[in-house]
Each structure stands twice: as structure tokens, then as C-alpha cells.
Amino acid sequence: MGDDLTRRSAADLAGLLAAGEVTSVELTQAHLDRIAAVDGAVHAYLHVSPDEALATARVVDARRTAGDELHPLAGVPIAVKDVVVTEGMPTTAGSKILEGWVPPYDATLVTRIKAAGMPILGKTNMDEFAMGSSTEHSAYGNTHNPWDLDRIPGGSGGGSAAAVGAFEAPLAIGTDTGGSIRQPAAVTGTVGVKPTYGSVSRYGLIALASSLDQAGPVTRTVLDAALLHEVIGGHDPRDATSLPEALPPLVAAARQGLTGDLSGVRVGVVTELSGDGYQPGVRASFEAALDVLRGAGAQISEVSCPHFGHALAAYYLILPSEASSNLAKFDGMRYGLRVLPQDGPATAERVMAATRGAGFGDEVKRRIILGTYALSAGYYDAYYGSAQKVRTLIQRDFAAAFEQVDVLVSPTAPTTAFKLGEKLDDPLAMYLNDVATIPANLAGVPGLSVPSGLSDDGLPVGFQVLAPARADDRLYRVGAALETLLEASWGAPLLSRAPELSGSTTEGSAR
Amino acid sequence: MSATTDLVPYDEAVDRYDPVLGIEVHVELGTVSKMFDGAPTEFGAPPNSQVTPVSLGLPGVLPSLNGKAVESAIRIGLALNCQIAELCRFARKNYFYPDIPKNFQTSQYDEPIAYDGWVEIELEDGTPVRIEIERAHMEEDAGKNTHVGGQAGRIHGAEYSLVDYNRAGIPLVEIVTKPITGTGARAPEVAAAYVRYLRDLFRALDVSEARMERGNVRADVNVSLRPSPDSPLGTRTETKNVNSFRSVERAVRYEVSRQAAVLDSGATVTQETRHWHEDTGITTPGRIKSDAEDYRYFPEPDLVPVAPSREWVAELHGTLPEVPAVRRKRLQGEWGFADAEMRDVVNAGAVDLIEATVAAGATPAAARKWWMGELARTAKTDGTDLEQLPITPEQIAELQGLVDSGRLNDKLARQVLAGVLAGEGSPEQVVAARGLEVVSDDGALVAAVDEALAAQPDIADKIRSGNLGPVGAIIGAVMKATRGQADAARVREIVLERVGQG
């Protein structure tokens, strides 16, 4: 029964719980068993919290028995990316500099997950401080793609995507600064949504780039993503950039999409997010998906966003600049790692330097150095200032495009999952993975990745849908329609075609 | 650096050079919570007790702006006749130091909330001076480092340092003047009068307790010299954290004398921050300011711009209190003080104290007598300001009430005052503890009188026979026996009663 449960969608599980056909304890235990069986091979989790998860499950079961009114997702377990602060549960952001830190407070989205009665299975692996596209920059070892353990699961949220893709959790939380939810979803055959900037509170997300970061759902179905988005979204006074207005009806939009009808919906294909650099198998899958949308009644047209070509360059100035300041607090003075200099006096300045030298990985240091430079007096206007201008131009591109169409679409990532280690020594090649996802972060608009099938290499391809700010509901309608029509043509969810993971390779099981 | 610093006598220095001032005043706002989070702001609480995850800068936290702090900043700006920005942002000032939990300070950089203002202050002799205000901006305070094991709490030679983040995140408004020129020899006076003006203003606005001794108001004083008012500005020094009016005056004097000596010797003044030493009255070099100091300012992405509506600004303008100078004229009329008396009161910084004492029930004359008499002498002896004396206006009113009701005479009242200043409690408590009350119990006085009469029977007889001349001798004896705590007039009455002359 356990295997069956772990393969069900969160919406199905919620139905089983509500009908009394399964308890949250059974459900939670089934996922803990699955983690124990396969995470040694996948390494999606940095920390598993069976005691806390089962305690929450027991409380929810007791409340259900007592006839309390419960949240629809009450009792459905979830995994949380390790960049999200969880009270009493280790939170490292994938970095040695936070090894052993146990936060004294919860992120707002965690408070909302707990209020909904969702057991937290544990914390998922990620590139250190969310810097990377492969999860290979985790200080705690890389995560493996469930489709091929020799390949990357995407990044930075490879742990969350792999956990969901390997049935180690029905739901997970990711964060997306330049594609860290959507690109892992694409390469693992799962669903990921980056909400409108300000839709989900950032309070308690360990900041990478404050003006770009946004938390969102990582799931196996579009409806599940909408359900989870509604749990974690909405205004939070602790986040000054949180949107004041209520979320649009997301679950309703997903259910509307599941009818498979997109009559009258105008879909724009972004000219600049195709062509050279996009793997042929990715392009083929994308084109096939466009045909499916056309068949559903959508009007497909091509739309140019002329400044998207500068997005990557602007992003790699804004992100390191903000990150260099956000990561300044990790200095060994108050929490986390503290390293004393090997020789000489242990002054505050020297302890800070020794701690940061030992605690940060190379990619983090690379971006701190870039950002420090870009913000320096005399360079600020040329780098940070210019990048902000490009950002404005990209926002205008989106605004103009959304006057012509309701949503924009592109492949989520230019390639399928590459081999572990393949791009580790080539930062530029690694950065290019996010070329299609970055514009949404620069403009603050929402984006979704849903599987469009397999490439000719047998690996999953992601289809990206972008909508105007505050119109996240459009993502769910279009995404759910594409998902249901494709699954109907395949006869089963894409993930059913992933190889079975051997339950025996439990070497160094979940930490 | 030579062991002793050459100084030119002040009068000579200002004969040869024209001093120019620039003053930055930081005021801690008296909000109940911090600038960017809900942490409380109680002064003097145990270390690191007034903190939240936000004040500690823990991973993941975000700032949320204190609306009351913005309101206070706007009111300060309006009171300084500033323009109020229609839209302004916070910026991050990046530097590593253990007393700032995020390793950046959230401040305003090139977009202050208030700018281009002016105030007209008055020197002690009534001379008006106009001070141009460059800007007033909002920022958060840092925590406090305590260095242990070195000399006199200095970092040099310390074994370790402790950090208290209670102050980290307390809202500050920093007010920056344009260069203050044309003061000539009166630069020190102008500096002190300006800081005092601001202190009075903060209190009138009720935006801060503005207690100098608690560091609520801190001044950084920039001084430069030039050969003549027509010359370009000279190189300045910035003397940090000068925290009393007297010190502001002394620090300016010192810097003028010191810089004059440097220039006289043919050398150039080094642009640097300097530390003020209250005990010795000198400044010493701090870190050297140079281009190497790069704070990498950029707009704070975690906060949205502040955009006060014009309606709100107009509404706040309506809440501004009387300008202190206007208020003084009004109070002088109400109190009936002569011009010279009022000027003394103002110069002694006693206006608020007397007003509060009158509000607590004392007459203006009595309030003035205490603050400008006994207490002014005490402050002078202790080298401190009146308001820093450990006594409140309410206590003075209470003390005067005891005199008015006849429970204390003047001599006893001074002893009670000394007790209050010594920290023995309220006047009532000191009266009780020291047993200083005027003996008004007739039984005790009658017994003392009878005793005195019995001890000097010949004098008693004289009085009985109608010769009232020697009554004083009996009164004196009674006063001596009651250690001065008797009311002499009442003793006289009793003496006459007892000998049958009453």
C-alpha cells in the first residue's frame, strides 16, 4: 500500500484523508519509508524529521477524528527547501557556514504550512545559498536526478524537485531567484511555479537576491501546485514587498484548465527564447506541446521581447550585488560556523575573514566578489545602475507583450539534465541554463514549468508559461490544460516512465 | 604623532583664521518599537533582551518600516523648515563590524526624507544666527561593543569584546547642516546653541526624550579653518560623539586652536575623524577618512519606497508645536520674569525644568529660585547640566509644597534637597528618613520651652514681669534643643503662653 500512496497526487491524498480511507500517520510513514529506501541513492534530503512529521500527523488525525474543521491539505506531508527557516529544525541553505544552526523562528510560509496541519518531512538539498543550476554546489554533496542518477536534478532546488520526482514527498517548497524552481522541475519531469514577486512572503527565506527571490510550489501536478500556492501565498506584514491584495483564485483556475478547453486564450511564443542553444529534442517537445495548445483552442502567435538577450548579463550583476550584501551577515560573530585564524591575533576582523574563507564554497565566493566589485564606488553606475536600466527594459518588453497575448511560453530550460560534473568548471555554461527563466525574475512576473514530454535522449523537457504580475491564475489554467491533454495522449503521467529506483542502495541513507 | 599637541591660544587663532562649522546631530526617536521590527526599545534593559530575530539580523529576516518613526522624521523635517520628499528610499551602507548585525546599516543615502531647511537660533546675548539645514534622514542605530581586559574599555589590548544588540535598530534621525560660516570667534557658542536648539525642538515635538546623558542626542562636529571668509573652505576634521552642550563648545574651541597650530607650522590639516575626550578636553585622531572607505551603497531591496502623501504632510504640519523662541516669550509673560531673569533661565537650560515644576504645582518664582539658585550651584560644582541632576521638577514642586505648608523651613529644605540629590528618595522620604521635619507638635515644643524656662529661672521671671527682651534667649535654647527643626514663630508664641503673657 505504501508505494501506492507515495505515487498519488496531493489532491488525491487530501481526498483519501477526508474520506477517512487513510490516516495522516500512515501517509507520513509511507513517505518516510520511501525516503529511507531511496534517498541514499537520490540524496534529496539534507535533514529528515520523522518525529516532528509523525507528531503533526497524529495531531491532525486526532482532530479529524474529533470532527474539527481542517484545511483541505491537512495531513498531507511536505518537504521544505533548506533555504527556508524552520524553528527547531536545522537550516543550512546548503552551506557549511550554517552547519548546525537551528533557527529560533519559522518563515511565514512555514507558519502557514504548520497552520494547515501539513507534516514537514525534512529539509531538501540545494546549491549553496541557492547559487547554481545543478545542486552540485551544495556543501553536503550533490543530489541525483531520479531519471538518471548520473545526471543533475537541476538547481538550485534540485533536492525539492528530486524528492517530489522520486516520490519521497508529494509536495515541496522551492525558491526561485533565476529559475531555481522551474529549471529543476523541467529536468526532473515535475511541476514548479515561481509566483508573482510578492505573492508569497519572503520572511524567513535566507536571502540570495532580495529583489528576485520568490518561494513557490514544487509538485507533480498543476492542481497540486495551485493548492500549495494558496496555502503559502497572500499578504504578510513582515515582508514589506508582499503584495497587499488577495491571491487570484488559483485552484479554481487549475480546475478550469483541467477541462482541457483553452478557447480564446492568446498564447505568445517568445521569439528570443528559442533557436540556437536549445537542444533539438527540447525544441521538438516544445513544438509538439504548442500543437496540443492549438488543439485546445488557444491562439498561438509569436511575440518578440527584444531586450531578453540582455537579461542574463543584467541578472549576473544584480544578483551578485544583492547577494554580496545579503551574505555579509555570515561572519561567525552570532551563529553558525566560527573559524579562528590559523596564526596571529583573533580579532573580530580576522575571525570574520577566516570564517568566511572556510565556510563559503567557491561559487558563493565568486558571486560575492563579483557583487562587491559591481557595487564599488566608481563602478556602480556602469554595472549595477546599467543592469537596473536593462531590468526596466525587460519589464517594458513584458508589458508590451502582455498587451498582445494572455500568456507567454517557451521551453523552461535549453537542455535536458546534463551529467554530474559536466559544467562544474564552466560557470558561464552553467549560467546559460537559466537563460529562459531569468526574465521572469527580473520583471517580477510569475512562471510555471510543466512537463511537455521526453526529449530524444529519454529525459524530461519542461514547458514554461509566463503571465503578467498578479495573474498567476493564468499559469494554472494553461498549465493544467496542457498537462491533462498531454497525459491523455501518453495514457499516464510522465513520471510513470521514470526508471524504478532500487530500494536496496541505501548507502549513507538520509541524514 | 607628537606626545603633546601644539595649540594656538583661541583668541589668536580666530584672529588669524576664519572657522567654518558643519554639525551632524543624531537623535534617537522615542518610538516604542525599533525602526524595522517590533523589538522593544527600553533603555538600560539587560543586554540582548530588547531584540527579535530581526534586530539580531538572523538569516531570513526582513525589515518592516516603523510608521511612527517616519512620522517623527517628517515632523522634525517640517520643524526645520525642510522640503519633505514625495518619494524616497532606504539604502544599505555596507561595512563589516560586529555591532551591526547584518554587516550593513539600513540608512538613507542620496534620497533623504527631508532636505533644504533652515532654523534661526539665538545666542546667549540674544544674537540671532540662521543655520542652513542640508538634510534630515532616517537610519537605524548600531549595537554597542564593550571591550574587556584592555585599558579603560578601549579595544586596543582588550582580551575580548561583548556585543549588546539592544540599541541595534533603534530609529535615528540624522540632521546635517550646510557649512556654517560667518560665526567668527563665536563658532563654539553657535555650535552649542544649535545643538541646544535641536534638543529643545525634539522635546517640544515629543519625538524623543532627548536626554544627552543617555546618548539620545549625539553630535558630530566638523571644523575647518581658512585664512579669510573669502578663501575656499579648508580641510575639515569630524569630532565624533560629542554629547553635551559644554563639550560641543569645548570641542570646537579645541579644534580651532589645534588646527591653527597645524596651519601656522606650515603643515596641512588631515581630513579625519577625531575622538573627543571629556576628561581632558582634547580630541585625538580616529580612523583616517579616505577614498578607500567605500560603503557600496545601493537601494535597500527589502523595503519599498517611502511616499508620504501631501495630505499627510500637511496634517503633520498642523501638529507642530510652538517654535521654542516664541514659546519662551510666552512663558516669560506668564511667569512674570524680567528680561535678564528669563535670559539666565534660558542660558541655564532651565525653561523646561521650570515649566514642569510650575505644572507640578510650584509658583514660577519658587521654581526659578530652586533651579537658578541651589541647583544651579550644584550643577556648576559637579560640572554637569541642570537636567542631568538626579532630581525631577515634580520633586522640586513637592519640596516647595513642604515649605509652603510650614513643614520645612528654608534651612531644612536645603538639607532635604541634598538628600534627594544624594539619591535618598523623594523629599517626603528624605524628611522621614532623616527626621528633618519642623517640630510642629506643640506637646514637644511646650516641653522644650518649659525645660528652657526652668533652666534659666531668672530670664523666665523677667519675661513674666513683662520684659520681653530676653525671649530670644529662650527661643534660641529651644531651637538648639530641637536641632533647628522648630518653627521659631511658634516657639515664641508658646514661650509667651507659658509665662502667662500670651
Image (cartoon, rainbow, N blue to C red):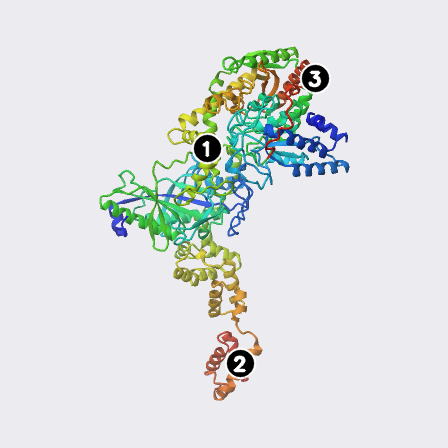
Residue tagged 3? A259
Residue B448 circle label: 2
Q: Amino acid at mark 3?
A: Thr
Residue A249 appears in view? no
Residue B442, quarter of the rendered image = bottom right
- How crowded pointer 3 is (Cα within 10 Å; few <14, some 14-19, many 20+) is rated as some
Disc with the residue nearer the chain's start (3 vs 1):
3
Direction from residue B80 to residue A235 in the image, left or right: right
Percent of width and height locating residue A361 = 47, 32
Q: Circle 3 marks a residue in which chain?
A: A
Q: Which structural element holds mark 3?
A: loop
Between circles 3 and 1, the one closer to the viewer is 1
Residue tagged 1? A324
Q: Amino acid at mark 2?
A: Ala
Residue A377 circle label: none
Residue at 46% in and 83% down: B470
Q: Which structural element holds mark 2?
A: helix
